[in-house]
Amino acid sequence: MFLSDSHLPQLLTAEDYTSQEQFQRELDRLFLPSWQLVGTMSDLKQEGDFFTFELLGHPLIIWRTEGRPRAYLNVCPHRFSRMKSETCGNTGERLRCQYHGWEFDCDGQTRKIPDAQSFRPLTKGAMRLTEFPVETAGQLIFVRLTDAPGPSLSEFLGPFDEIARSCFDENRVCYDRIDMEVEANWKVKVENGMESYHVDQIHSGTFGRMPDSSSCTHELQENRSTFATVEETEDRVTQALDRFIHGLAGQEPDWEYKHYMFYPNFMFIKMRLFTWAETVLPIAPNRTRLYTILFCHGGRPGSLRGRIARRMMSSWGRRFIRIVAQEDAEIIPEVQRGLAAARRPSTGVVSVREERCFHFQEYIRRNTSAETEQRQTPNGTTDGETSLVHS
Ligand code: FES
Ligand SMILES: [Fe+2]
């Protein structure tokens, strides 16, 4: 059942989804202080492996050294070239800039400057890479773009820290990614991901019908919310197949579908043997990058039965989740066009089934309104109570 007993107002105005000023406030107040998903440890299997990632205007290089990932701005302190332009590779024990060949060690210190005497005098340690905090949850790698005091990743994930780690642990295998851009404000996509009301209309060929309200559970916390439903099929053949595949992976059948949302822009979903993590990255007020990493349970590492289960499931999962993503990607720009129209017929309304959108809009209001005096809390966002908070 849902938490509200009557419909709710649409709190955000069209301008909140279209204005450059609001966009900048969101970047500064919501995105820079929070943890951002950038990739997985499966991208960094060997010492020296790296990958590059464009995060909120910051070109990053994530590099595995001494067994752990570290994150640097992919901009050289010499004359500002991007040091690496490849999406991934292995750079060994030194990071070498592709322009003039400066080399850096795993602490970001300059280790070699070709023709060094031509730079005299140069204070030792003066020219180094900009490093950012990195933490992992299972195989997922997160970066914070500020050194300012803020929450640890565990604090950011709060009571869902443990489930996040287990949903992306070493028993899961990363089998696909979806990286796309849509012509819409980032909040349109987040809100789309937080309501099941559009399922009948948009996902009739994939998810089928929206779940009955009696099988739905919403959980609302400050800066987070979840949605859970149970999808047990009545079809005996599908049930038997589900049990068989779960058995191969050494898992008990689990028909719960659960969506975890961490404001502003990180979510993960658990569905049968699948888990997927999504990040919604603003590019401009009306342009957003959607980056999704898909995992499938493969039983214990090295298990043959698990590998068979994963092979059977992953091609189905890849197709299913790609179709769902495309279905949403087609409707989201239509919302943005309506928001950008010269006029609209009403101020909007939010159903009880969409109450997580209202909760998210309260979070946006609380943290970004021009009048709000910013009061930092341990989780890096502003303090405040909401009418729907059930912590
Ligand atoms: S810009 Fe990197 S070495 Fe010159
Ligand atoms: Fe959807």
Image (cartoon, helix red, strand yellow):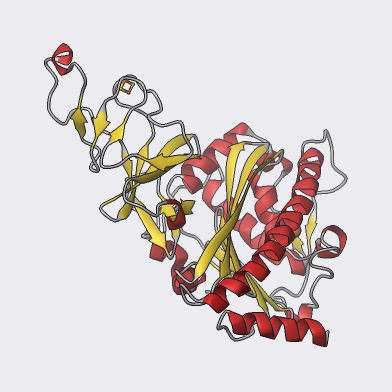
- Residue 324, picture quadrant: bottom right
Q: How many marks?
A: 0
Decide if residue 228 is in sight here: yes
- Residue 94, picture quadrant: top left
Ligand 1 is located in which of the four quadrants?
Answer: top left
* Residue at (80, 52) in percent of width and height: 348
Residue 353: x %, y % from top left: 76, 69
Question: Would you say 224 lies left or right of 203 here?
Answer: left
Q: Compared with residue 388, is residue 70 higher up or lower down, i.e. above or below? A: above
Question: Would you say 24 lies left or right of 178 here?
Answer: left
Q: Compared with residue 117, is residue 107 higher up or lower down, i.e. above or below? A: below
Residue 182: x %, y % from top left: 70, 41
Q: Which of 101 and 341 is in front in this view?
A: 101
Q: Compared with residue 356, is residue 233 higher up or lower down, i.e. above or below? A: below
Residue 331: x %, y % from top left: 80, 48
Residue 11: x %, y % from top left: 69, 53
Q: Compared with residue 369, is residue 142 higher up or lower down, i.e. above or below? A: below
Q: Quadrant of the N terminus?
A: bottom right
Decide if residue 232 is in sight here: no
